[in-house]
Amino acid sequence: MSRVSTKGLRASLAAVAAGALILTGCSSGGGGDDGGSSDEKAKQQGEEVSYTFGNAKQSTGPAGDLDKNATKGGTIKVLQRDSFAHLDPAQIYVSDEGSLATLIHRGLTTYKKVGDDDYRVVGDLATDSGKKSDGGKTWTYTLKDGVKWEDGSEITSEDIRHTFERQFADFIAEGPVFLQQWLAGENGTGYRKLLPGGPYKGKHLPDDVLETPDDKTIVFHFKKPQPELPYALAMAGYAAVQKDGDTKEKYDKKPVVSGPYKIASFKSGKSMKLVRNKEWDPKTDAARNQYPDAFDIQFGVSFEDSTKRLMSDAGENQTAVSFSNQVDASSMDQVRTDKKVKDRSVEGYQSYVGVINLNMSRLKDKKVRQAIAYALPAQSLISAFGGAGGGKPAGNYYSPTLVGHKPSDPFNKISKPQGDLKKAKQLLDESGKKGMKLTFAYQNAPEWQNFSVAAADNLKKVGFDVQRKDIIADTYYDQIGKVKNKYDMYHSSWGADWPSGSTVIPPLYDGRQIQDGASNYSHYDNAETNKEIDRISQISNPNKAADEWMKLADKILKEDTPQVPLMYYKAVQLHGSKIGGVYFDEQLHDLMPHKLYVKK
């Protein structure tokens, strides 16, 4: 589950970017009754990125060098606006902490870049991406030999059992809940009833839910098939936690780590220093490298300041990057036109789709909703976010970063990005609602203020009476998240947790999830759609499910129009001239920290 605020793209961690994706079936390492080759890929016209599930051979380290010029040594300066609120993996669910997690935490699976457009989900602590059986209801993982915590102790299946059992504790409230809900067979917070309080009073999940028959083996038993488990397990929120070192709430500030780097110091809001973890063995890690001696992280650096410092490339800025700060909108044109600066930039699509929610509790006439959809100017929003570097017009709800994406544009957001006023006026006239009052709520931030003016202007030309209402950013999602809010239309942005419609369509359009604080912001409730969500969720072949999610997304948009798609988000990031190994990672949707090195 993920949304965007004007404080920055605070993303879910498995969100992916830069092109459409295709999933394969289970790996050859998957065994069981579902089989399939891990290298099996179905490329379709227009697809740019493919994902596969890796077998044991493909999950073996060392990771290898993506850049043949990579060298070891030196310290990288990291400029970050936001301090890390959470270091406990189970509490991590935003992008900046997710970037950090690639350096300090490991889970059962992870992502590996294997080519310009190819990624693979590989075994991380586990020997492969998983062996599934019983139609995908049972998944078995075996731990690699030689995987250790920073204190030199072995990582065992008891640590992994503890990792998942503690996620049922009440103090774990910020991270993902997919695994917990799947294991319990419960939606919402009902999963906590499976193991109230977690394992801290000596109780455990039963073996028919989570089984650890020996020190190396972990077996998940689900009530329904879960063909996308390898993706879920690659989330930072499901990285391993040491059983003996678990200090409950205090673990959030001082975790025991297993990645290539460990935390030498952390002053919240000020700084953090990472140094090499000598207990990390590259032979056990198929994805990560350990090039720099250290990362020196500075907090409180705004997007504007980090952009200026990295553009200057002076002094220590030559060996500086930011994990998640992006180029600020005011500098975007210069970054994209000055060759010397542009050569030190990377960019790519994020998984977010920016939309305007149409409150269906108030806007009950479909022609009125569709008139709004035709009228809204997607280009004005993109311009507010820095132009082409900030995003591109969205024709539908389905990000091009998702498996099964197909281009469509039913409301002319791409073909007429400034709005189709003629078609909008026609529909409003047909509805008989000319002069209708619309209350448009938006975040009190420059980007949305600018867009709200352009949007209101278009809507007034069509025949609406628009009343703009600004809401402070800190409480914006709380306000629009109320079912009985007083607004007719309001923006939001959603990003996938991994490259599947299963992490987009159900949370946004399942009418059974309408409640205060839920993400069905338009209050859309269609019995046929709810039934389709249940049907598609049970499809065990992820490629077939991907096609069905896309079809359903377009049907919702065309036939009911609960939201107006406006923008697919993009990001541009800078780095100093003495930093190598920089690339925009399509699954992290930021530059990848564990491939960076200092040039000699």
Image (tube, rainbow, N blue to C red):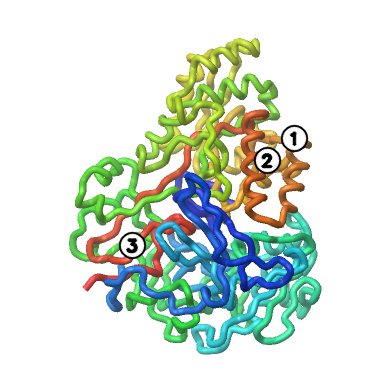
Q: Which amino acid, mark 2?
A: Tyr
Helix, strand or loop status at disc 3: loop
Residue at left offset 67%, top offset 68%: 35
Helix, strand or loop status at disc 2: helix
Name the mark on residue 468: none
Q: CA distance from mark 2 to mark 3?
A: 37 Å
Q: Which amino acid, mark 3?
A: Val
- Tell me which numbered mark, 1 or 3, is placed earlier along the sequence: 1
Q: Which amino acid, mark 1?
A: Asn
Q: Quadrant of the C terminus?
A: bottom left
| Residue 234, picture quadrant | bottom right
Pointers 2 and 1 in contact (C-beta within 8 Å): yes
Helix, strand or loop status at disc 1: loop
- Position of 600 relative to 330 (above/below): below
Q: Is residue 334 left or right of residue 14?
A: left
Residue tagged 1: 526
- Tell me which numbered mark, 2 or 3, is placed earlier along the sequence: 2
The spot of residue 433 in percent (x, y) is: 63, 13
Pointers 1 and 3 in contact (C-beta within 8 Å): no
The spot of residue 272 in percent (x, y) is: 39, 70
Residue tagged 3: 582
The spot of residue 254 in percent (x, y) is: 51, 75
| Dot 1 crowding, Cα within 10 Å, few <14, some 14–19, many 20+ | some
Residue at left offset 34%, top offset 75%: 291
The spot of residue 589 in percent (x, y) is: 45, 55
| Dot 3 crowding, Cα within 10 Å, few <14, some 14–19, many 20+ | many
Residue tagged 2: 509
| Dot 2 crowding, Cα within 10 Å, few <14, some 14–19, many 20+ | many
425 or 163: which is nearer to us? 425
Residue at left offset 48%, top offset 14%: 461
Q: Nearer the viewer, mark 2 or mark 3?
A: 3
Q: Is residue 137 left or right of residue 461?
A: right
